[in-house]
Image (cartoon, grey):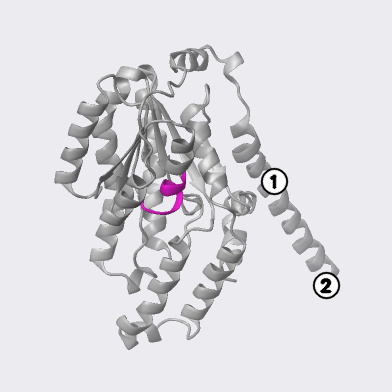
Amino acid sequence: MSLLVDGIAFIFLLYTVHAIVQYVNTSVVANINFFPFFPGQQRDLARLSTPREELYTLITGCDTGFGRLLVEALANENKPVLAGCLTETGVKVLESSGRPNLIPFLLDVTNPADLERCQKLIQSVCPEGLGAVVNNAGISQGYLVEWSTMEEARQVLEVNFLAPLAMIKMCLPFLRRTRGRIINISSASSIIPIPGLSLYSASKSALSAMTQALRQETKHMGVAVCEVVPGFAYTNLISRITAMITEKRGTVCKEIQGAYPENRIERSLAFFNGSYRRSMSPDFVVQAIQHALFSRFPKVKYQVGKEIPLIRMLKALPEVAYEAVWALY
């Protein structure tokens, strides 16, 4: 028996050491600035322009959440902003602020006609080019994979991945002129996919992967590409997720529901409600975006949230331990 206990303890020790090594590799080393030692990176940094605060920043999803708070923060500093809103109400609220450098406009990021109008607006207002584009608009639809519809999957991918792609393609000619910046807002679920947020996790993972590749593609232009990775924050996204999960109880057929644990929905709701109660202020995310926009040397990735260190540790675990943790969900 003692040999068995010693063996289990030894395996656990190996797993712990493995997790710590992986955590250091992915967290600490990733944040060390090696550019004094690598001439190639020196050249990349030299191409970055000093941010010009007189240039317009284009932000999507400005009705609520991070987008709305970011617009208010920039407007309070008299920085020029093009604020894309999904609703007329969102536009009117921002218009009522009376900020001369704030231009709110209707923008459904999935609507080609709206994108065309957005392009014309940039051409008329920003003859020198754009300072930055912030792809913030995002949605969550669906629940468990089998409980989600294909229409929900298409909608999530359209808004969270394809729309930012379209915005980037449209804005790059204006960003090249100024050596501006692209800021993509992904999610901690791109690091650790969350059961019950399968579609959302997939869309944000796709956005994260594209962001990493795009950064290498635009380096020679001096266009910086940054990813902001928020954890759980006090926004209305969590309330929409819990409402959506509750709704599935009445829309998914009993046969499919019966194939899952009886308390599946209650456990999911407890997880998301608990995460919301422990959430951070969205101001921390807004501050990270502002650093990405106006810092002389922006970070490649901004991971923001109380749970980020835990998520990094989970990511670093061996598969057996990782699966054991999720078995508790």
Question: Which image quarter is the N terminus in?
Answer: bottom right
Q: In this rendering, which labeled residue sits more in front, label 1 or label 2?
A: 1
Q: Provide residue 248's location: percent of width, then percent of height.
A: 36, 78
In the rendered image of this protein, does residue 6 appear above or below residue 214?
below
Q: Residue at x 38, y 72 (%)?
A: 244
x then y, percent, for residue 281: 58, 53
> What residue is drawn where x is 45% and y is 67%?
239
Which amino acid type corresponds to the residue marked 2 in the rendered image? Met
Disc sitting over residue 1 in the figure: 2
Q: Position of residue 27 (x, y in %)?
A: 62, 39
Residue 105 highlighted magenta (yes or no): no
Residue 32, position as x, y percentages in the image: 63, 28
Helix, strand or loop at label 1? It is helix
The disc labelled 1 sits on which kind of residue? Ile
Q: Residue at position x 44%, y 53% from top? A: 65
Question: SS at mark 2?
Answer: loop
Identify the magenta region: 62-69
Question: Which label was assigned to residue 91?
Answer: none
Left or right, 99 with respect to 5, comes to left
Would residue 245 appear left or right of 25 to someone viewing this image? left
Image point (54%, 70%), residue name: 273
Camera sees residue 266: yes
Q: Tell me the quarter of the image containing the C terminus.
A: bottom right
Q: Is residue 237 left or right of residue 93?
A: right
Q: Is residue 231 above or below residue 132?
A: below
Q: Is residue 302 visible in this depiction of the protein?
A: no
Quadrant housing residue 79? top left
Residue identified by numbered label 1: 20
